[in-house]
Amino acid sequence: MNNTILIVDDSKHVQRQIEIFLTPEGFSRFSFANSAQEAFQLLELDGKNEKCEKCEIDLILMDINMPGTNGVEACQKIYTSGHLKHIPVIIITAEDTNERLKQAFEAGATDYIRKPLNPVELIARISSVLKLKKEMDDRVNREKELLRLTQILEETNAKLQQANEMLHHLSRTDSLTGLANRRFFDDLFQSEWKRSIRVSKPLSILMIDIDCFKKYNDAYGHQKGDECLKQVAKALQNSVRRQCDIIARYGGEEFIALLADTDKKGAITVANAMQSNLAGMNIPHKNSLAGSVVTVSIGISSIVPDITSTPEMLISAADKLLYLAKYEGRNRIKY
């Protein structure tokens, strides 16, 4: 057997006797201590390594009467050490008083054997205690494994949740500008349209287009064009303050703004802020027909929706006004 038994007894004769009784039964690993203090050293409870969490001892046979620290006191120290409390202690006693045995059990002893030792009783009690210890160790190991698997599952779920959140974010975000994408805008617009009908509140759409953007790409290259789109997106986003105001990339160099609970006057204020913020960036555009820097044209349509109107009507109206703004010279707002 692979179990290691620590025999703590001040009698060399008793130590040898136990070894002789147990060896034919397959026990071959023994440690010996002549006192409780020697046992503490073997168990690393001598004050130097009391935080050791690894102990090779599987069972302790402890004489109850020893000079110095007796078996009851030693058992109590072992049991209260924390990391050794899982090691069963069988008390060996020549006393026949129940009070002494009660003290031993209260101190943490698992079982007891009376002297003189009976080999049949000794082997039976040791086998029974070791079987119980194995069952308890197996249960502890299963609990540890379950805890480990639970932690892994929690970590996996957390990572999966993060991945899902990222996918959700990507599904609604334009990868270049970081604004909402058209798919997200379309879904939100339908929802906001229905809400506006219920509460009879105005809804405004701004169609925004970068003036002469093809000429910008031709002059500066597509990489600079992408940087320009990012800068324009930033200027547009910085022009709104409410969380319900959504700026989206509608396609190519075209953007769209959805302003809930906003009438035409409020929408014009936002459009002016957009043009002002973009002008403040002073992005050169040498081939523009609207000036020397990047500019935008904006078409605004506003409505208090009802059952006779449709979302497409509002989009179409803003788009026509955007076309008019570009036709009349660009870098202007039409409403």
Image: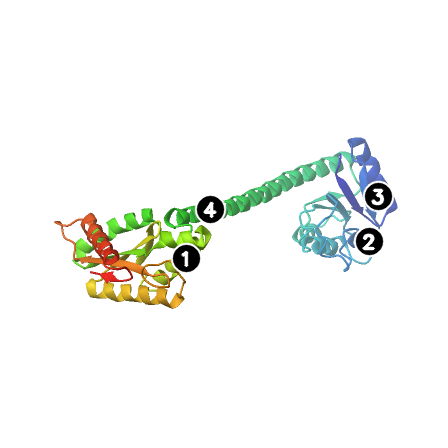
Residue type of the residue flagged with mark 3: Gln
Circle 2: residue type: Glu
- In primary-sequence order, the first of circles 1 and 2 is 2
Q: Callout 1 environment at 10 Å: few (<14), some (14 to 19), or many (20+)?
A: many
List x then y, in percent, for residue 98: 68, 50
Q: Identify the mark nearer the N-term, 3 or 2.
A: 3
Residue lying at the far left in this picture: please name it. 308
Q: Which residue is mark 3?
A: 15
Q: Local crowd at mark 4 within 10 Å, few (<14), some, or many (≥20)?
A: few
Inter-mark Cα distance, 3 to 4: 63 Å
Q: Is residue 252 left or right of residue 307?
A: right
Image quarter for residue 241?
A: bottom left
The residue depicted at 42 percent of the width and 46 percent of the height is 167
Going from N to C along the chain, the mark reached first, 3 or 4, is: 3
Disc 1 vs disc 2: which is toward the camera? 1
**Residue hosting label 1:** 228
Single out the mark in the foreground, 3 or 4.
4
Instruction: Look at the numbered disc 1 and give the secondary structure of its residue.
Output: helix
Give the Cα distance between marks 1 and 2. Answer: 80 Å
CA distance for labels 1 and 3: 89 Å
x then y, percent, for residue 177: 40, 54
The residue pinned by badge 2 equals 38
The residue that mark 4 highlights is 163
Which amino acid type is marked by label 4? Ala
Q: Nearer the viewer, mark 3 or mark 2?
A: 2
Of 159 and 316, nearer the camera is: 316
Q: Mark 4 and mark 1: span between their CA atoms?
A: 30 Å
Q: Is residue 224 left or right of residue 7?
A: left
| Mark 4 vs 1, N-terminal side | 4
Q: Position of residue 103 (x, y in %)?
A: 68, 54
